[in-house]
Amino acid sequence: SWSMNIKLYKTLLATLCSLTFISTTASADVFDQVEQQKHLATTVYPTSAFDEAAAKDMLINGSAIVSGVLSFVEPIYLPEHRKAIDQREGLWFGGKKKRVLVANKKIVLYPDSGYLREYLKLAANSKRKTVASDQFLARSLAATSNQYGEFGFRGLKPGKYYIVTEDIVLKRQSNVMVPNQIIDNIHIKSNHTHQYDVYMSYGEFLEVKSSGQAMKVDARMMTRSTQSVN
């Protein structure tokens, strides 16, 4: 009858909707698993246990102060075939060069821990992106350098800490004489404008040895890497 056909149709429709929901849910689960595998293939996490309570305790109710001035010395490009006394990725830092103050740059202070040490090691050596836990990131202090590069952290207890900045990227260029041909045993040189980016940052372990100590650090940013842009 007509009423039986309507009931049958509704039953089939409900069954199809249910199957579609199950199929969609299963597909979503498979998609999530694939995305998770991709994430794990490109990301690495520290495996050390993080003592959140100990880290929190280091940052409250203390009386020590750590302060400094964030700066860098203007790097001078040198071709790879030349030597310098203090060379970093083809760059030489002249001892008599004037320092440049770095304003409006974020500086973060972390209590020292095994978790932090493992994170830094992974970040330096792993080809995958190193990611820290939210709990670790939360147990830190942040400051921003003022117009004179000055920054400071208060309320610290005696112990070891690590302070680190974000990178700055300096866009630089230098005129370099390079040999391009030999005529009658004479090297003919040409003038080449070399453009490159300099990635600089500051990171240092320090120790507050007593309550009420006022420690000043020489927060000089150093070259982390360089990258040619031409």
Image: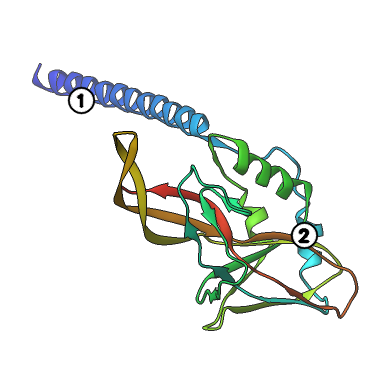
Q: Extreme bottom residue here?
A: 147
Q: Secondary structure at mark 2?
A: helix
Tell me where residue 39 appears, x and y as whole percent.
48, 34
Q: Disc number at residue 75?
A: none
Residue 166 relative to residue 47: left or right: left
Classify residue 56 by image quadrant: bottom right
Which is nearer the eye, 177 or 95?
Answer: 177
Residue 182 relative to residue 26: left or right: left
Q: Is residue 69 above or below residue 189?
A: below
Nearer the viewer's eye, disc 2 or disc 1?
2
Q: Extreme top residue here?
A: 1
Q: Which residue is mark 1?
A: 10
Which is nearer the eye, 88 or 204?
Answer: 88
Tell me where residue 202 appears, x and y as whole percent.
61, 61
Classify residue 70 by image quadrant: bottom right
The residue drawn where x is 10% and y is 16% is 1
Q: Extreme right residue here?
A: 210
Q: Secondary structure at mark 1?
A: helix
Three-letter code for the amino acid on which mark 1 is drawn:
Lys
Q: CA–CA distance between discs 2 and 1? A: 61 Å
Q: Which residue is mark 2?
A: 55
